[in-house]
Structures are given as C-alpha cells and as structure tokens.
Image (tube, grey):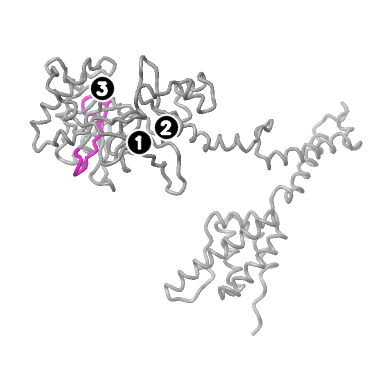
Amino acid sequence: MVYDIRPLANGLRTDHPVPGLPFVDDSHLPLDDGPDAIEAVGRNKGEGMWGRCDPSHEGGWLAFTTDPIAHHLGWAVRHHPDHGRTVLLLRDEDTASLHTYWTGAPLLFRAGGYWWDGDTWYRPGQIWDPVTEDYARHKARATATVHAADMLDGHAHPARTHLYKVATFDPATAQPENWTDDLTRWAQHHQKQDDPLPFEKCVVDLASPELAGDRLLGVPEMAALGGITASTLRGYISRGENDVPLPQATVGGRAQWSRPVAEDWAEARRRSSEGLKEAMSAGDRHHLAPGAAQIRDRFSETFFRFLWKRPDTRKHWALRHRNEPSVREVADQLAFEVADSLRQIIPTDALGPTLRHAILEDFTTSLRTAERRGRELKDFDLILSLPLAKMLSWFIQHFPTSAQWYIGEIMGEADKQLGIPAQVSGEALRRSAITNGHLDAQAAKEFFSRVVPREPES
C-alpha cells in the first residue's frame, strides 16, 4: 500500500524530529524498557485499546500502543541499534498502518513519503514489482541528509515554545510558529537523556534538487501527467481514491509534488489493472478486452440470426406468443448456442498441453519427495496443487473427450519418463479431481473407468 500517514506530533524523546510538527510529552510511556513494555501499555487494557511489537529484519524493533490517557491517539516507535529511535504521535487508527510500513527497510519518512534506510533516501514506493513482491525502490537524486546539528545555530528562542500534554493536545491548534524554536527546546531535553544520540546523527529532513520549490508540480500538472483532468484528481484526493501520493509540500493551501513522484504515480496508473484494461480494450464501446469483444460480436450475430432471420423463431415476437413458455423456449435455445460454442471460447488445443506439462511437473516433484523418503511410490504420493486439481476437474466436466485424450498422454509420459504405471497416475488424477477439484464421485468413476487402462494380466 502507498504511504499515506500524516503524523500529528513528535514524541519529546524521539531522536529524529519531523520538521514542522509540535512536540508532545511522552514521559508516561516506558520507551526505555523495550518493545514488550510499550505493547503492554495498550494491549487488552480496555475497549478500543491495543498494542503490538515486532522485531525488524533490518535491525532493532518496532512497537505501537494506544495512548493510555487519550484513547483516540496512539504512539508508534521504531528503534534501531545504530540509528536510534523515532517516536511519533498519531491518530490511534493510523498506528497499525505505520507499524506495517516500518516492518521493511524504511526507518524514517519525510517529505510526503520519501524514506531513509539508514544510508540512502528513496522516493515513495508506488510501482509494484511482482518479482520482489514489493514496491520498486527508486533512489532520490543528489540527496543530502539534514541533521539536527545543521539546524541548531544558537539564535532560536526555546522559551517561546510550548510542550504539549497528550490529555489536552489538539492537532488543529498545535501549530508551531517558528519550528526552529521548538527544535532547540527538544535539543535541550535531548542532551539530558542517558547516552543521547549525537545531534550529527539525529535526522531531521532531506534536501534534494527534485524537492526544490520551483520544481514542484501542482494539481493541474500532476493531473496532466496522469492523463486526467484537474477536477478528477481533486476528486481522487478528497475521496482517498487511486493511491494519490501525499504531496511533498503544501504551499498556500495547495498540494505540490516532485516531478519524479508525479511520474511514478502516472506510471503506477498505467500499470494498474484499470490502466491495463483500458489499454487492452482499445476503444471498445463496452471497454471489453479484444477476446471478450470478439465473443460478444460473434454471439450478437448468432443471436440476431436466431431471433430475427429464422421464421420459426421470429413468430415468438407476435403478441400471442409473449408468454412464459415461449420466452423459456427462446432462452433455452440461446443458452444452447453458448454452451455449444465453448470450443470457440476456450482454446482446448492450448489448454490440454498446458495441463499436461503442469501435471507432469507436479508428478515429478512428488516422485522426488518419495525418493528422498526412501519408499515405493503409491498413488496417494502423487499430489496435484489445488488450482491444478480444480482446472483438471473443470476440463473433464466441460470437454470430456479432449480430457480423455490429454489424460491418456499424461499417463503415457508419466510411464515412459518417470516410471509411474498408468494405473497409479490415473488413480492419482481421479482422487485429485474428486477431493480438490470437486468432481462428482460417480462422474469421476464413469470417466476414469473409460480412460485408465486395465492392469496387465500376469
């Protein structure tokens, strides 16, 4: 899922303050006692409260909890042994989502979803990679990490700031006037902690040419890249649709995105199921894929000929024939036309060989498993995957004569290539078609008794 979290405030004991956000006192949380203690604050402590902690494969741990005082708020914590910890206050319903984002490589999120893994800054993940089963990682160009030490210049006025309490915190009114003042007050508190992370390692923000104000795009430019109107994009944003990324900045109340983020969003739209369907429909009036459009056109012509050009059928249009039996007769004829045309819809000459290769591959895997266990192969050792068993059952029920031919080939190749007797492979197919493919037992008996050869006489 595309990053869409908007934290409300920094915890005072965070090592990595989010710029622009106020600071809230987190002294009532056991941050120094480890993840289990944080989880225990909210887990099963009352209605609407929850907490959780997990180790991270990238190092350290992560945890979240409902605030014990203000249950509509929650805390999320990400701790790393080398890079310190992040402590954020959020709406309670957002804590689990941020916890999920933190389970991978990201340690910090800034500028509308740009993220840092402890070494490199990446753009918000938007383009799904089916190979890695994750969003593609695109490095931000020419980035510089801005640390607290870079921003503490000795000219701020920390006494002008306000440290909020969670019981009275209102995110709508808690807007820092000069955030450098707030950062300086945080720094004063940070120095008093035991073994504080050096300011040179406390990450505040990132800088990059692609985030420069004069390079950001507004709604009209973003919409143009996505091939939609500005009003459509505004609708997406207001309704939370189509995975529109968070803006990198908001200037004068107007959302603005970096060009690379906008281009990635447009590419993600192009690669989405909706984008693929639109491309493949190629302007079809019903937005059907080419194959589906051909089927529609073929049946449209078939039905028209049947309903209009045949005198024995056209008479049903007369008023006296507009009754249930006549309509049922016509409906049955149309249904027969569809059922009788299955071979024009399903390419059995391609489906059969595909099933053959897939089943033999499963048989090979089962055979290797039996060999590793050092036992003689039995029919119950031959296992088909659930989708394959369902496809076999469907093939038998819809194209029994084609299935007869290809199952014969399967048994023959299993015998020649794998040394599996036809009776063993045939029984395995029968059992899989019944148990996992939901083929009726009696139908399976009738079919396989006509397909599987008898055992040779001794």
- Disc 1 from disc 2: Cα separation: 10 Å
**Residue, disc 1:** 141
Vertical arrangement, residue 152 with respect to residue 32, above or below? above
Residue 76: x and y, percent? 26, 33
Q: State left or right for residue 130 relative to residue 115.
A: right
Number of residues whose C-alpha sits closer than 10 Å to that of mark 3, classed few (under 14), some (14–19) or many (20 or more): some
Q: In front here: 427 or 372?
A: 372
Residue 173 to residue 222: above or below: above
Q: Quadrant of residue 228?
A: top right
User: Residue 222 location, x and y as percent?
Assistant: 47, 25
Real-space Cα separation, disc 2 to disc 3, in angstroms: 23 Å
Query: Which amino acid, mark 3?
Result: Gly
Task: Please tell me whether mark 1 sits on a helix, a strand or a loop.
Answer: loop
Q: Is residue 78 magenta?
A: yes
| Residue 38 disc label | none
Amino acid type assigned to the residue bearing label 1 in the image = Arg
**First in sequence: mark 2 or mark 3?**
3
Q: Nearer the viewer, residue 66 or 2?
A: 2
The part of the image, by quadrant, that contains residue 303 is top right
Q: Which mark is residue 260?
A: 2
